[in-house]
Image (tube, rainbow, N blue to C red):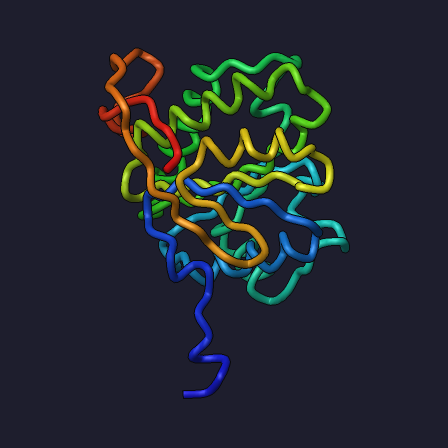
């Protein structure tokens, strides 16, 4: 086995249904991670990328690494881009219930297109310009992690670590059990401290019924 074949990828530790945070430092890194995820997903799986870095006519800016793998995924419909800030925060207001409803509609649409699984990449770096939204957004992120995702829905949340202060990055990290940083994936061990009632926030078939509050170990 050659060196390249024996090298472990960060996606080796990723499972379907995971909710992961990715702290990146460059557009080139975004390109590498996208390529890794396209390789990790199968031909019957779709990648939906919410980002404000790229135009949405199908082309990405030259700042991001674009190779045959990405080109092929775009042509086949396995890769799709949507704008991020206007999706999460239309009119400048974040509403967790509405956002989960949006994700459910995209999930249902993708399943209706015949795909067997969906991987969502959501770049929420727009939060740096909306600091008052950070706390409710982190609570939404934590609720998703506690409730759980269906086995055929994986979520990768992205933040540009160059534009956030350490305290903000720590809040974002606390809302995720998996952290991708500097090319390494860390799966943290959490302790569920007590149960909280299930609310109408979660939609059947999108998030599970188990919920609780959590502290990092």
Q: Position of residue 116 (x, y in %)?
A: 31, 48
Q: Residue at x 28, y 43 (%)?
A: 151
Image-based side of 163 in relation to 119, left or right: right
For this rendering, which residue is in front, 55 or 93? Answer: 93
Q: Quadrant of residue 199?
A: top left
Q: Position of residue 73 (x, y in %)?
A: 52, 57
Q: Is residue 60 above or below residue 158?
A: below
Q: Quadrant of the N terminus?
A: bottom left
Q: How many marks?
A: 0
Q: Position of residue 42 (x, y in %)?
A: 38, 59
For this rendering, which residue is in front, 49 or 191? Answer: 191
Q: Residue at x 71, y 51 (%)?
A: 26
Does any portion of residue 113 appear in the rendered image? no
Q: Residue at x 73, y 24 (%)?
A: 129
Farthest right residue in view = 62
Q: Position of residue 149 (x, y in %)?
A: 32, 35
For this rendering, which residue is in front, 142 or 156? Answer: 142
Image-based side of 81 in relation to 26, left or right: left
For this rendering, which residue is in front, 89 or 197? Answer: 197
Q: Residue at x 56, y 33 (%)?
A: 170
Farthest bottom residue in view = 1
């Amino acid at each position: 086995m050659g060196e390249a074949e024996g090298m472990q990828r960060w996606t080796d530790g990723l499972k379907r249904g995971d909710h992961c945070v990715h702290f990146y430092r460059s557009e080139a890194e975004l390109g590498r991670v996208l390529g890794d995820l396209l390789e990790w997903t199968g031909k019957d799986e779709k990648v939906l990328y919410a980002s404000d870095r790229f135009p949405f006519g199908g082309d990405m800016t030259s700042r991001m690494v674009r190779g045959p793998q990405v080109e092929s995924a775009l042509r086949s419909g396995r890769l799709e881009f949507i704008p991020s800030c206007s999706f999460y925060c239309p009119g400048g207001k974040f509403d967790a219930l509405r956002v989960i409803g949006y994700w459910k509609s995209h999930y249902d649409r993708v399943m209706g297109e015949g795909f067997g699984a969906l991987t969502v990449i959501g770049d929420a770096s727009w939060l740096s310009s909306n600091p008052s939204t950070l706390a409710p957004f982190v609570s939404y992120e934590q609720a998703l992690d506690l409730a759980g995702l269906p086995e055929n829905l994986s979520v990768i949340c992205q933040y540009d670590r160059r534009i956030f202060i350490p305290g903000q990055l720590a809040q974002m990290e606390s809302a995720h059990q998996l952290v991708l940083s500097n090319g390494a994936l860390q799966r943290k061990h959490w302790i569920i401290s007590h149960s909280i009632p299930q609310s109408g926030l979660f939609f059947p078939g999108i998030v599970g019924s188990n919920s609780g509050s959590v502290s990092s170990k």
